[in-house]
Amino acid sequence: MAYMALYRKWRPQGFSELVGQEHVSRTLAQAVVGGRVGHAYLFSGPRGTGKTSTAKILAKALNCEQGPTAEPCGACESCRRIAEGTSMDVMEIDAASNRGIDEIRDLRETVKFAPAMGRYKVYIIDEVHMLTSEAFNALLKTLEEPPPNVVFILATTELQKVPATIQSRCQRYDFKRIATKDIEARLREVVEASGIAADDAALALVAREADGGLRDALSTLDQCVSLAEERVTETLVRDILGLIGRDSVVRILRALAAKDAKEALSAAADVFAEGKDAKQLVNEMIAQLRAAMVYQAAGVPDGVELYETDEAVLKEMAALFPQDTFLPMLRRLHDALTELRWTTEPRIAVETAMLAICQDGGAAPSAQSGIASEELPQASAQVRVLSARLEALEKKIASGGFAAAAVKPASALTPKAARSGKNDEIGTAAAGGRNNPAPQPVVGGDSVFVPTKEGEAVWKRVLDVLQANPEQKVIYACVSKGTFGGMTAQRFCVRFQSQFLAGRLDRPDYRNVIEGYIAEFSGQSLSLVVEVGEPSAAREKPKPAPPKKKTASEMIASLPPEVRKEVKKAIDIFGPDAKIVPVPEGNTISQDNKFQQQKNEPEDEAPPFTDEDFAGLDEAYVPPEERRSDATPSRAFPRQSKKSLDRCTN
């Protein structure tokens, strides 16, 4: 017969064998005996706590030939088939691989049929939270009103993903993590019944590392038995699980208590040389410190599980650290644990945390100054900005070029301006969101941003520092699309093409961090100005002036001499209000549309003629008063003159 894993071999076969879930087993047993079995159950809880085992026990209790009973016999054909997974009346469905609506439709079709052998048809849907929304909707009606003698049992490790409509149709049972002492007792029963030699310390370690899951504990024990030559020892368990070990952790904590950075780093180096995980090291340091803190405060309270069970070690650890040092040390180690989630150099994160504890006991500046830890980056940036401004003011005072009215003192700023770092006198502006339009340069002597190589270098250093600092990667993602737009004596311009990215710099924490780095790298107290799109100078170029219209005199002067004479004659005929309409060279106008062309011409092309317009013109023509009274227009104006007149008037 093939070898069977311990967690399968020692699976509970009755409600009395369930470990650590008495509230569930007692309730279900009484429901079976009293005939109050529901049509749908929802089992939720961590992995390895007995959800699927309880579902199978309930199925056996309902279909046992001796039942329904709270203690199925396990010997009848129905019980044996259910235990082996071959019963036609108990369907176990893995929702992780059968999660679609088609599978649920097939289930709805099979629900209609009566049980083949037992009293009830039981559907066990494991990891039910993996079903799709459509599958859940298809299951709703059947789950609410199933056919007689049908019981649904849904099991999940993520209850929050199960829709409320499903939960409301089920009786819900929450499975809790199993206590370490209960797991240890169960492991001792298993090794004694199986003839396995194991130390009590090894079983205690396996139970503690199982984190409340009995199945995980049995799997770990099975692995240790396979590797052990004679008996399962604590050292063997530590090697298999990759644990650091009490000796190494205590050595590091002793060095931290003595502020001995060299010894602490040396002890950590020995741990890393063995190939141990940095996260596991920090976790065990936190657990050991927590045990020492609890022991120092309350001894060994009943019901409180401690990482360290040796009272002598607990007493030593509690004596090493004052009571007020536990909190900052634990906070600093938790910060390192958070940093280990994304860093590519875990060893550096651990060593940095240990050095910080050696230098100041792990107390962050926020703990000493009353500033919240999440506000620390903003506070440090503000300190850099103020330091740079103070240094710049001292230099101006020393050089005698300081004007008292040039800078408004910080106390004169409004609270809002003080928080956001905005000062009208130094021209701080932000290209904000919807309510903050893109800022324009201040008109005055400090309004033109001058691109310089020094400014480019400063902006590049700011981007490099933001990119290298893990805590400021979000700020870097925002400002990395910005380009240096120039600087003045008091302002530093960054230009964006996107209004959204520019608007992010309206946040005081972003602005203060960037201004702090600019002040640090430039040695000047410069205010950040954000522009969107093209440079403001390009946006404000004056429009070219419209071409100047020619006066009547200029138009007449530009005509050929023979034409100017004809113009004078036309003026005599049509009066001084006549208009000049120039016709391009080569343009011909037929006699039919000549009147329409004149009608469509604008009336303000040229002003009326005056006497000055005719100064210097040739006087060879005959004035009207000297002309013959019987002269016709055709005789008074030769053919050539009529052509010239038509050219000028049209």
Image: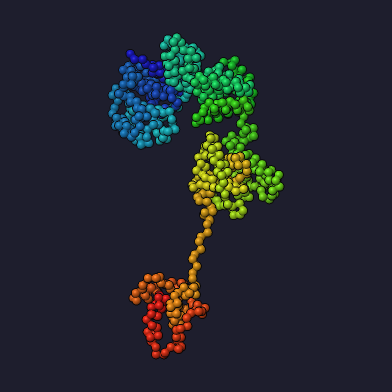
The correct choice, above or below, for 290 with respect to 596 in the image is: above
The correct choice, above or below, for 541 with respect to 530 in the image is: below
Q: Is residue 27 visible?
A: no
Quarter that holds the C terminus: bottom left
Residue 395: % across, % down = 68, 43
Residue 357: % across, % down = 60, 26
User: Which is nearer the eye, 454 or 312?
Assistant: 454
The correct choice, above or below, for 300 with respect to 611 in the image is: above
User: Which is nearer the eye, 81 or 372?
Assistant: 372
Q: Is residue 93 visible?
A: yes
**Which quadrant of the structure image shows residue 572?**
bottom left
Residue 57: % across, % down = 38, 21
Residue 643: % across, % down = 38, 78
* Apparent side of residue 85 relative to residue 502 in the rendered image (left or right): left
Q: Residue at x 50, y 13 (%)?
A: 200
**Which quadrant of the structure image shows residue 329?**
top right
User: Which is nearer the eye, 423 or 262?
Assistant: 262
* Apparent side of residue 42 relative to residue 469 in the rendered image (left or right): left
* Colour convention: rainbow
* Apparent side of residue 614 relative to residue 56 in the rendered image (left or right): right
**Which quadrant of the structure image shows residue 48?**
top left
The correct choice, above or below, for 367 with respect to 458 in the image is: above
Q: Residue at x 41, y 33 (%)?
A: 162
Q: Residue at x 47, y 81 (%)?
A: 618
